[in-house]
Image (cartoon, rainbow, N blue to C red):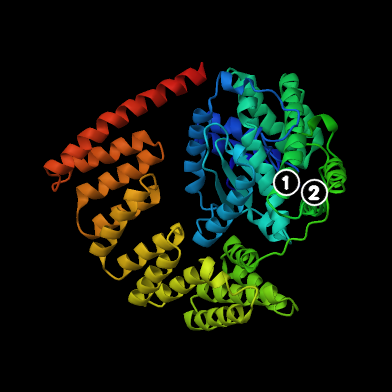
Amino acid sequence: MKNFGTNAVSRHHSTVTKKSLSGRLNRMLVQRSLVAAMLAALCYAPAGYTQSTSATQNLPTLGDTSREDLSPLAERKLGEQIMNVVRNDPDYIDDGPVSEYLNRLGNRLLDAHPDARGEAAYNFEFFAVRDPVLNAFAFPGGFIGLHTALLLTAQTESELASVIGHEIGHVAQRHIARMLTSQKFDSYIPLVALALAVLAARSSPDAAIAVAAGGQGVAIQKQLNFSRDAEREADRVGFQILSDAGFDPTGMVTFFGRLQASTRNYTDNAPDFLRSHPLTSERIADIQARAQTLRYKQYADGLEFFLMKSRVRVLQDTTVQGLMDAKQAFELQLKSEREVDQIAATYGLAFVACKQRDFVKASTLLEDAKAQTARSSSQKHVLELSSAFDSLSIDILSGSKQFDKASNEAAHAIERLPLSRGLVYQYVDTLLEAKKEAAAGVFLRDQLVLYRQDAKLQKLLAKVYAAEGKQALQHIALADALAIQNNWSGALQQLDIARREKDAGYYELSVIDANERDWKESHKEELAEERKQRR
């Protein structure tokens, strides 16, 4: 199993052993610096949510000593470093329509509370990871992840938005930075002990007590108490963000109910001093009391929410058995009387057929889903505003080796949805499959003028150069991608390879020399910061 910071302590609660828990933590320590492991412990969300709150609310805060050591910019950099590991993990869902939907939903909440972006005006990133545990998590600097189980469990968009609002608040209030600062970066052992104690509590409260009693009890208790306060604050602020953004605020209440049902076996039974979050029953009572003070607000869920649940159901498990299970679920869903359920089920069956490489069947089902949507007066706008149908159609055409048709469809879709990053990546892929490297290169260079910090565009450009036999430029593009991810040692290594290529001319060598000077300085600063943190 893979670790994603906060969710690293929430996997398979009742079945994992202390040995497997320690193994997972050790793998995480190897993957990233010890600072990332510290965050994994501190961001943990056992009750299914992690952190959140809004600076615009008149709520008691937990203090702001964080700025003494960890600035908002440093916090963002730390989050980006962790995300470099997450994005390379196979459990990270790199799916254009899902990512775009989550980011639209998250930014709608942020627009209701722009102060939540903080003084550094974070550009938040929302993403999904494969995980059967009902949970979500936040990294410092505005990175928020949701487990696939959570996306599938949410019955309404308001329920899903309530989780995201909660996480936004954690980032806005800089709970993680405060936690790290309270340790002054001078004691890693209590933080690792905290992770082990919380992990052990999932399967054995007695084992957790033993860990907590092993010389680090006071430090652990301090961190757990802090996290309880952070969760209470996050719940209340997330509730306010949810309401102000126009969603049904009772969505948080109903989702807490689902959460309580899924965690009853362990959450309420753990010793109070080992709970890093308030009891779910306490949180439900608090939010229910707040909901009673507001007028009922009806919110109509759009088709896209249900389409994304269908995509996630397929992407969660693409094994043969997983696809069969998804197909059975969609066939059952077709019997629903609700129009959105029927469309989403047909779409899901088309996606399953595409994954099974039955492209004729996939195309027929997708056209059926499109026709159903077009006939719906309340849902037909989704055909124009979402990339869900276009993306699947492009995949079907590419899978059936109709590359010219696929690239043409992607080009038309981009004209309608120019901000869709997923369609951009698909378009380049189809051009490369159609052996149109020159067209792909021109398009990518235009895109990089607008999105210079898009590492994925740089990697695609490297593929274009490789197809054209331009080895030096290929490695320069790979170096640029690694530099964007702050992987300075890897970037410098790629520059060294580029310099030794036979086709490295005056222009290429000039670019290599200029980048090398800048990146060596950045690498030097990073190493100095790491040494400072270890002291």
Q: In the rendered structure, find residue 371 and report the number of the disc placed on it.
A: none
Residue 258, placed above or below residue 413? above
Q: Mark 2–mark 1 contact, CB under 8 Å?
A: yes
Depth check, mark 2 against mark 1: the one in front is: 1
- Estimate the x, y position of residue 338 in percent, counting from the top left: 73, 76
Task: State the SS at label 2.
Answer: helix
Compared to residue 380, the image places residue 300 above or below, namely above
Is residue 273 found left or right of 317 in the rendered image?
A: right
Residue closer to the observer: 200 or 68? 68
Residue depicted at 35% across the width and 34% down the height: 489
Q: Amino acid at mark 1?
A: Gly
Answer few, some or many: residues within 10 Å of disc 2's Cα (few below 14, many 20 plus, some between 14 and 19).
some
Q: Residue furthest front?
A: 295
Q: Residue placed at 52% from the left, 70% from the top?
A: 384
Residue 115 position in % (x across, y down): 61, 37
Position of residue 396 in the picture relative to residue 441 (left or right): right
| Res 12 seen here | no
Which residue is at the front of the view, 24 or 8?
8
Report the disc number at residue 263: 2
In the rendered structure, which disc, 2 or 1, sits on the residue that comes first in sequence? 1
- Count every numbered label the image shows and give the total: 2
Q: CA distance from mark 2 to mark 1?
A: 8 Å
Circle 1 Cα neighbour tier, 10 Å, few/some/many (<14 / 14–19 / ≥20): many
Helix, strand or loop status at disc 1: loop
Task: Name the one closer to the observer, 294 or 345.
Answer: 294
Q: Residue at x 56, y 59 (%)?
A: 98
**Residue that mark 1 sits on:** 48
Q: Would you place residue 526 above or below residue 30 in this image?
A: above
Type of the residue with mark 2: Thr
Look at 42% across and 61% down and name the residue there.
Answer: 418
Furthest residue in direction top, as rendered = 535
Q: Position of residue 194 (x, y in %)?
A: 69, 29
